[in-house]
Amino acid sequence: MPKPLSDGAQRLVFGLLVVVLVAFGIYWSVGGFSDGGENAPSQEQAEAPDSSQQPVAPIPTTAAEEVELFDLFPFTEEELTAAAVSAQSFAEAYGTIDYSESPETYYGRMEQLATEEYAETLAQSSGAGAMWGERAESEAVSQGLADLRSIRGFDNKSIVFVLKVQSITEDNDGATQNLGDFAVTVVREGGAWQVFDFQPADLGNLGEG
């Protein structure tokens, strides 16, 4: 039968157990029992700075009065002007009709300002044929006028202008007809701006797409 420990021995054993448990807890808290480093942070992770704590440099800004607006467009001021001239010239050609000429001549003037694709569409147009015979007898001549109103949209190769178009008949009464607002899409083709589409502005012409 084992001999029971004396009170002093029991207190010594108890004290040793306390020391062992405390040492074990400290060892565990500092990662002494890791699984080979799989869950421990790598040296790079440990040394990597916290990006959330890095200072952020302010972006450079320009005072409003110093902003060059045309730097925000994918074309120069000269290119925008040339595009506007093309749109306006086409709209004026649309409103200019000499009924002593043939419909083909009328559409031919617009075809010269249009892209090859849109020129083919114009060549197939016959909307003016019905009224042509009625006015040919009076040899009426209508002069087209167009006024640029706004830019509806643009991208790096096309611009959509909105223009108000009139047609003034040069006969005895000198009647002026408001043809309405038209959206004219012009595109850069062959080093020049040409009309890609022309239709009433309320139809939602948004460009080449």
Image (cartoon, rainbow, N blue to C red):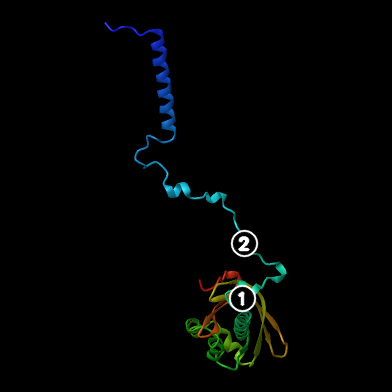
Report the quarter where the N terminus lies: top left
Q: Report the number of numbered marks.
A: 2
Q: Quadrant of residue 144?
A: bottom right
Along the horizontal axis of the image, is 140 left or right of 103? right
**Residue underneath mark 1:** 161
Q: Quadrant of residue 175?
A: bottom right
Residue type at tag 1: Phe
- Say if 156 sits above or below 130 in the image: above
- Say if 150 sits above or below 98 in the image: above
Residue that extends furthest to the left in the rendered view of this protein: 1
Residue 119: x and y in percent read 50, 84
Q: Earlier in the sequence, mark 1 or mark 2?
A: 2
**What is the CA distance from the residue labelled 1 to the residue labelled 2?**
34 Å
185 and 93: which one is in front?
A: 185
| Mark 1 element type | strand
Disc number lying in front (1 or 2)? 2
Whether pointer 1 and pointer 2 mark residues with C-beta atoms closer than 8 Å, the reply is: no
77 and 126: which one is in front?
A: 77
**Residue underneath mark 2:** 59
Residue 149: x and y in percent read 67, 75
